Image (cartoon, rainbow, N blue to C red):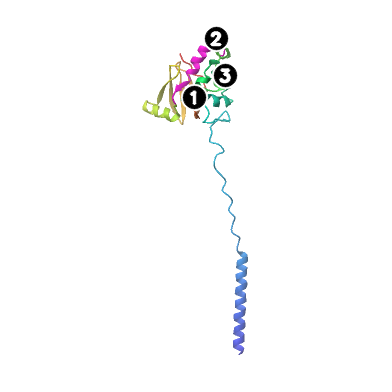
Amino acid sequence: MTFTRTTALVVSTAALLALAACGQNDARKEPAPIEAPTPSTAPATTEPMVGGVAMNPSDNLVANASKAPNLTTLVSALQAAGLTERLQGPGPFTVFAPDNAAFEKIPAATREGWMQPAQKAALTKVLTYHVVPGRVTAADLAAQAQANGGTATLTTVQGEKLTAKDMGGGKWEITDAKGGKAMITQADVAQSNGVVHVIDTVLMPK
């Protein structure tokens, strides 16, 4: 009898200890971590920026250029030459757009003279020399250059030609009819009626 009671006591004690251990193990379990929501990596906008302002690819060449603070001189010149309506048309057009700094390289007397009614024809000649019929992207330039020893030749609306040379690393040099050179500083700005490549120097026809 004594042996049986002792045995029962030992078994009961062991059971209690086991339950206590289970309770402690349950208490030590850490709660499942709460997963933080994955932040969105989508860009705020897909519209390209020119002069810090978004260009809407659904807008035409003139509408977008008018929004860009670094293309104000070009827009004024287009207005003086009476070309805004033409560049608002269906096109498509490829425009090598000199920024304000590019126009600043031109002597002030020449720039101011271009804006006068008496020199409208001269201004029109210069501006249409920056326009190529069709939509010519940087990829199109690269394909043409690859097929022609590294240089693409483009015929402008004005009638004379421009050459675009692949300088490597995505850089393009544009050479005008007088041997002047400009660099594309921003390529492939899509428009509803074409594409714009911003350049750092005004191109000059003969």
The vertical placement of 13 against 117, above or below, is below
Q: Is residue 122 magenta?
A: yes
For label 3, the residue is: 76
Within 10 Å of the Cα at label 2, are there few (<14), some (14-19), or many (20+) other Cα atoms? Answer: few
| Residue drawn at the location 61% of the way across and 80% of the way down | 12
C-alpha span from label 3 to label 1: 22 Å
Task: Give the number of the mark in front: 1 or 2.
Answer: 2
Q: Amino acid at mark 2?
A: Ala
Q: Where in the figure is residue 117, as x and y percent of width and height?
A: 56, 11
Q: Amino acid at mark 3?
A: Ser
Q: Where in the figure is residue 6, as x and y percent of width and height?
A: 61, 85
Q: Residue furthest top?
A: 118
Magenta: main secondary structure:
helix
Which quadrant is the N terminus positioned in? Answer: bottom right
Magenta segment boundaries in residue numbering: 115-134
Q: Please state which of residues 173 and 198 is positioned toward the viewer in this rendering.
A: 198
| Residue drawn at the location 43% of the way across and 30% of the way down | 139
Which mark is first along the chain, 2 or 1?
2
Disc 1, SS: strand
Disc 3, SS: helix
For label 2, the residue is: 118
C-alpha span from label 1 to label 2: 31 Å
Task: Give the number of the mark in front: 3 or 1.
Answer: 3
Q: Is residue 78 magenta?
A: no
C-alpha span from label 3 to label 2: 16 Å
- Label number found at residue 183: 1
| Residue drawn at the location 58% of the way across and 22% of the way down | 72
Disc 2, SS: helix
Which quadrant is the C terminus positioned in? Answer: top left
